[in-house]
Image (cartoon, helix red, strand yellow):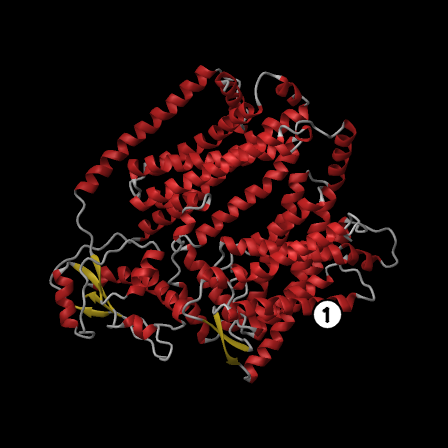
Amino acid sequence: MNRKAIRTLAYKAFRNSGGLKTNASGMTFLIMLLLSVSFIMVIGSYTFPWRVYSELFETQNGSILIINQPDSFDDFLYEADIPHTNELHLQTDAYYDFTYFEELLDKHDSYMAVVFPQNFDEAVFDSSSEEAPEILTYIREDNLIFSPRKDYVVDTILSPYQSYIKEHAGKIIPINEPVTVEVQGTATAPETSFSSGIMRFAALSLAPLILFIVMLYASMNSGTNIIAGEKEKGTFAAILLSPVSRLELIMGDLIGVSLAAFLPALVILVFIFLLPSYSGLPGLMVAIPLLLSLAILIASLTILISVISDSVVSAQTAFLPLFFIMVTICVTCIQSVDSAEGIYRLIPVYGHFYGLGSIICECTARDLGCSLVCILLTLIISAICIYVSVRLLSSERFTMNNMSDEDHKTSGKKSKLTGKTLPGFIIDQAVYPLVILSIFQTLAMLPVLIKYSSTSAFADIVESMKAVNTFADLFSFSFELLGSFLADPLFIVSMSVGYLLMMCCYLVKVMLKERIREKKGRIRKHLASLGLCIEKSTLIKYVGGLVLGVALMSSVYLILNLTGQVTFEGFNTGFDVVSTVLISLLMWLPQGACEELMFRGYMLPRITERTNRIFAFILSSFLFSVLHSMNAGYTPLASLNLFLIAILFALISYRSGSIWITCGAHTAWNFCQGNLYGLQVSGNELSSTLIKTSYTKSHLDIVTGGAFGPEGGLAVSAVTLPLVILLIVLIKKDSKKTSRLW
């Protein structure tokens, strides 16, 4: 291996990195780096000694006693990654004996006791009993000091445990108001202040997100310029003729791009660990290898994109989906940062986000073990990317710039006509649906909020907002509020009007940007350009789509039923329920058509015109998945399933020549999922359903989709994936199909 060539290529790639691009000599750069390190050490000298002394003289924190702790509570604490211990194994049948708990709190210098009834799990998970046991809490008499601590425990531990029991047992367990007891001792309050909560949120959510964005940006600046840039300038062929193997070429670029992404992130990471609230030097030593492995992964993916592309613009455009995917994963992680399953801490990217946040907060042996596995898997994936890049460079197709000067001129004219470069055009396609959705959905909520403002229900909403302390609480509260609104006919009608107005916005946008000279049939032609061509077969296609949507969701429900995940418990035939369900259908009709018009009717053909059909299918389907990423219960499997659903609808639209079939299928899918079978619709739980459905005790979230609904489970994967494969085969065999969508 030619080490000198690799060093030269690495240095060239590193200097080619955006803001780090400079004509300074290597010695100047080295001096700047040493000055930066010296500055960090000076700051550290003011911080680390204070950390050490403060930890040496720190008094013992007050604790919470758990009496008759059930196994389900222990499982919940472990899944939620809440530090805890059960060394005392306290047991008692004195459920209401407050004098006993006075002595207990005094003896163990604790400020709060949570008391479960004996045989709690047996009572909760007993399907024959409809009653749920109550949880008692005892708090010290000096509640002016400990009342905020009690609220914190109830909001961040006991209330999520309520949801955990409801999900696994289908019951709501009451949590009684705390009983105040007099204690002679003086326990020390735990560090659960507002400021410590902010620091914890910053460590678990904001810090990893910032590190991801910095590394993605730095990697894009350098990685998309190296190979694709050389192709664009016509100098890459000369590089290949030099006495450097393709593996050495890729390895040199990989080292340079990795350093360009890693070093700015490292500086930020060091400053984060200097803060006294975090794990300090031990945590930094564990976080650095994890951060470096992420830099290598992003760099290897960026280089692979650069190898495939033939210009810097095309490479940056192809990099945008990678950027969106990474940011979407970060948003998903933020949403479930306190309840992430252990397996996600081992998966690359997910493991990096959760691992960095957890290590910053408190570096444990578990973090070290998960980081090692995550690093190993990351290096394997990076090695595969390197291997593919080397193999691609063996093909002439990926070593030359196939665009002629005439192509460049044509491309330049096209971008002038559209008013945007290709990356700008892609960003516009991604942002526009989010903007109009946020505007019209907010407007749709205003009439309901005005209506509620004069009722006692509004006071309940304001009161429940007091428990919102974190982003996870905010997500949960938002979707609980939305679920309650979906039972109100006023909100359903407002949303229906909102979706119709959104469709009008797209029609107006097309009329303003894509003008048609002929006055006769102008509206019909604009509708046709949105995939809504009016033909004799339009009604048949739409009804066929409704039948298809019912069949798809019925297949999902059948799979869940046959595999023992859900049980059918009868029908809801009350007048209020049936009337609300029928009104809900009025919302699902424009809702399905609106989302289809956004992603399949408008976005898909226009991205195809600027790029190619395959890229348009992938990008529009990915953006459809991203649109739902803020919903409650969103998981990696949910993102994959939504991508498959979008691909399926895109293929159906492409083969049928319009979006009428998918408009009907989308409407029927959501209606059957929520109002017919009583399942969650993309994280929204509807209260008005025709069929009573409940999860069994043995149900698995990976099959049912958990809080997100079937779209987050394997049942939907089993239905959609075979259909996607079948349609791809049929379209490939259909030689008469043109490349134009509609």
Q: Is residue 658 above or below residue 673?
A: above
Estimate the x, y position of residue 46 in percent, counting from the top left: 27, 32
Residue 217 spot, x, y in % from top left: 53, 36
Of residues 415 and 68, the one nearer the viewer is: 68
For residue 416, side relative to residue 253 (left or right): right
665 or 140, which is in the foreground?
665
Q: Report the residue marked by disc 1.
A: 543
Q: Is residue 259 visible?
A: yes
Q: Amino acid at mark 1?
A: Val
Which of these two is toward me, 154 or 328?
328
Report the residue at 53% width, 26% height from top: 253
Residue located at (59% from left, 65% from top) = 444
- Is any atom of residue 435 visible in this view? no
Q: For this view, does 478 lie left or right of residue 44?
A: right
Image coordinates for residue 271, horizontal then vertical, percent = 36, 35
Query: Is 558 located above or below residue 355 in the figure?
Result: below
Q: Residues within 10 Å of mark 1 (few under 14, many from 20)?
A: some
Classify 312 as above or below 192.
above
Q: Is residue 464 left or right of residue 726?
A: left
Total residue callouts: 1
The quarter holding residue 310 reads top right
Name the secondary structure under disc 1.
Answer: helix
Residue 491, given in percent of the width and then of the height, sits at 57, 70
Q: Between 600 and 737, which is closer to the camera in this rendering?
A: 737
